[in-house]
Amino acid sequence: MRRIAFINEKGGTCKTTLAVNTAAWLASARGLKVLLVDLDTQGHAGKSLGLDVRTLPRNVFHLLTEPGVRLEDVVQPSAVEGLSVLPAYKEMADFPLVVAQDERRAHRLADRLAPAEAAGYDVLVFDAPPSMGLTTRNILVAATEVVVPVALTYFALDGCAEVAATVRQVSQSEGRPELRITKVVPTLYRRTALATAILERLQSYFPDTLAATPLGYNVKVDEAQSHGKTIWEYAPTSRGAEMLADIASEIYGVAGKKTGSRRARTPRRA
Ligand SMILES: Nc1ncnc2c1ncn2[C@@H]1O[C@H](COP(=O)(O)OP(=O)(O)O)[C@@H](O)[C@H]1O
Ligand SMILES: [Mg+2]
């Protein structure tokens, strides 16, 4: 089972957009059984798939903090075949406080997701909150592959260095030798001198992991989210869909691990 996390401590770098659409692509274009795990208080991953996360009686917070709650009690289906979501909502803000006394607090998520492999999931995709606190630490312990979306703005490189340092630190201190950054994805790309200069810097910092396709600005991507749909449901022939498919395919190919393609089919057209 692959475990792919989308992490950057900055908000608005397209973590949720890439997590949701990569998860949907893995399910529809590769026929994999995918669980999208949201850990952000805003609940945007669930919302992007049309879920009303405010009305759900239980979400990832309850799985993490109540021993009687099982994975299957909180997983929700989505309109995309093969894709399920473990939603989050504002209760997640209390998570660090509730587990403060637990020595294994950084391992909560990994422990509670342990049944996912036996439940038949091929891939776990994590959507992280915009901070490097305990929740993101839990994601780094539960994941093996880290994708860092970097919005091409002036402060972009700061966030990147921070993620790289935290990944190294967690890998050593939590006994996770396989944990590594597998892709750095430039996002909200526009052809400006500043964006080009930042891209060049990223290329020199991450020569092996920088994605070949930056996620360019495309209004259909934003619109799809506001309609609670993946880009392939909302605007399958858009430039946004094309870029997101290229990026998902790069992320899928990156580890070189064969997870199989059991129900391979082409993405559904809306
Ligand atoms: N390629 C794109 N073109 C235009 N808007 C985008 C694109 N990708 C994402 N957005 C919009 O940018 C905003 C931030 O994206 P989001 O994925 O929520 O970032 P994060 O999860 O890192 O905070 C959202 O409103 C989203 O719809
Ligand atoms: Mg987000």
Image: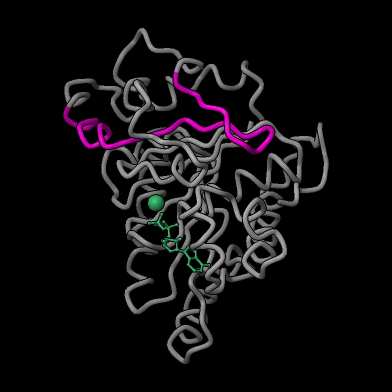
Residue 1 position in % (x across, y down): 64, 30
Residue at x-position 72% and y-position 42%: 28
Q: Nearer the viewer, residue 87 or 133?
A: 87
Magenta-drawn segment: 74-97
Which quadrant of the picture is home to ligand 1? bottom left
The picture places residue 264, in percent across and down from the top left corner, at: 82, 39
- Residue drawn at x 34%, y 21% is 57
Residue 130 located within the stretch drawn in magenta: no
Image height check: is 270 above or below 57?
A: below
Left or right of residue 222, residue 165 in this image = left
**Residue 235 found in image quarter:** bottom right
Q: Residue 6: percent from the left, percent from the top? A: 47, 50
Q: Is residue 112 left or right of residue 91?
A: right
Residue drawn at (33%, 21%) of the image: 62
Name which quarter of the figure residue 209 lies in: bottom right
Q: Whole-percent x and y of residue 240?
A: 62, 66
Query: Which residue in the rendered view is the most extreme toward the top?
Result: 68
Does residue 99 sit above or below 172 in this rendering? Answer: above
